[in-house]
Amino acid sequence: MRIARFSHDGEVAFGVVEGDDIAELASHPFGPVSFTGKRIPVSDVRLLAPVLPSKVVAIGKNYADHASEMGGDVPEQPLIFLKPSTAVTGPGDPIAYPGSSERVDYEGELAVVVGRLCRDVPEGKAMDVVLGYTCANDVTARDQQKADGQWSRAKGYDSFCPLGPWIETELDIADLRITTTLNSETKQDGRTSQLVHKVPALIAYITSCMTLLPGDVILTGTPAGVGPMQIGDEVSVEIERIGRLTNTVVPRAPVGSVAR
């Protein structure tokens, strides 16, 4: 089942993508699913970020080849950092390039969407708390990451966490191809089988220190091939059997302006 969050005629709703249509849900997808009976062509809606998480929990250096290209080894335990909820944006939305950075990178990733409130989840039951999976781009101001010595500013700008296009709930993620293209040129090409710390282990580790809420998102790490984007570039993250997430890089709006 593919669950999308969408806007149509000024209203925001969840729905299940079925071919060329979306079957509207009566409520959110974090519980029993029921339908309104309304069907809308996908071409007539605007797809939004599939969830609005309370937090995005991301994992650094979880592919050995990426850890190597960044000049280090894979950490013995998962390396956790947070991206704020305000960084989340959706498919087709712009990535705002801040004037304070001279290098902003793409990082294509598999994202896990949490389906229920959970804490201290045993690894053997970790998949029970997963609603599904989507594509993510862990956008990073690389120069600020290096300068700050920690990652909050570099990873936390508005629009630095594109998610989408929808949540795939019925999926074996053991070995899926994940690619990132920049202006249609392939830059990253990896597989989820290369994850060092697998999804069940990540869930167990994260929930050992913090409670996850329905709709929270875990970014599982990026393969090798990260690199810079420039204003005007189009970047796409595609994961086998999920879909493609595409965004365009634009200048960040001047200070004092109000997003609408």
Image: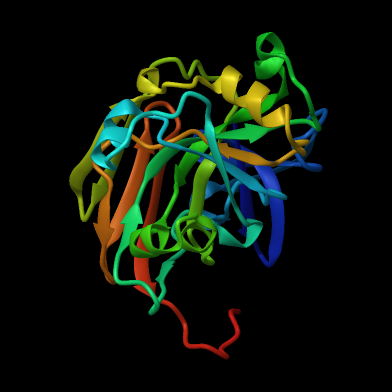
Where is residue 217? Give x, y as percent: 62, 40
Vertical order, 93 against 246 (above or below): below
Identify the residue at the far bottom of this view. Answer: 256
Q: How is the image coloured?
A: rainbow
Vertical order, 86 against 50 (above or below): below
Identify the residue at the far left of this view. Answer: 185
Vertical order, 117 against 154 (above or below): above
How many marks overall? Answer: 0
Q: Quadrant of residue 247?
A: bottom left
Where is residue 180? Give x, y as percent: 29, 43
Which residue is at 60% across, 85% downward?
258
Work out which quarter of the rendered image holds the N terminus and state it.
Answer: top right
Work out which quarter of the rendered image holds the C terminus and state it.
Answer: bottom right
Where is residue 70? Give x, y as percent: 29, 42
Which residue is at 81% across, 42% downward?
26
Q: Name the side, left or right, on which 230 lies relative to 197.
A: left
Which residue is at 72% across, 29% downward?
207
Q: Nearer the viewer, residue 195 or 12?
A: 195
Q: Name the side, left or right, on which 204 lies relative to 33.
A: left
Which residue is at 45% across, 56% downward?
149
Q: Quadrant of residue 81?
A: top right
Q: Nearer the viewer, residue 56 or 215?
A: 56
Identify the residue at the far top of this view. Answer: 124
Where is residue 57? Give x, y as percent: 60, 42
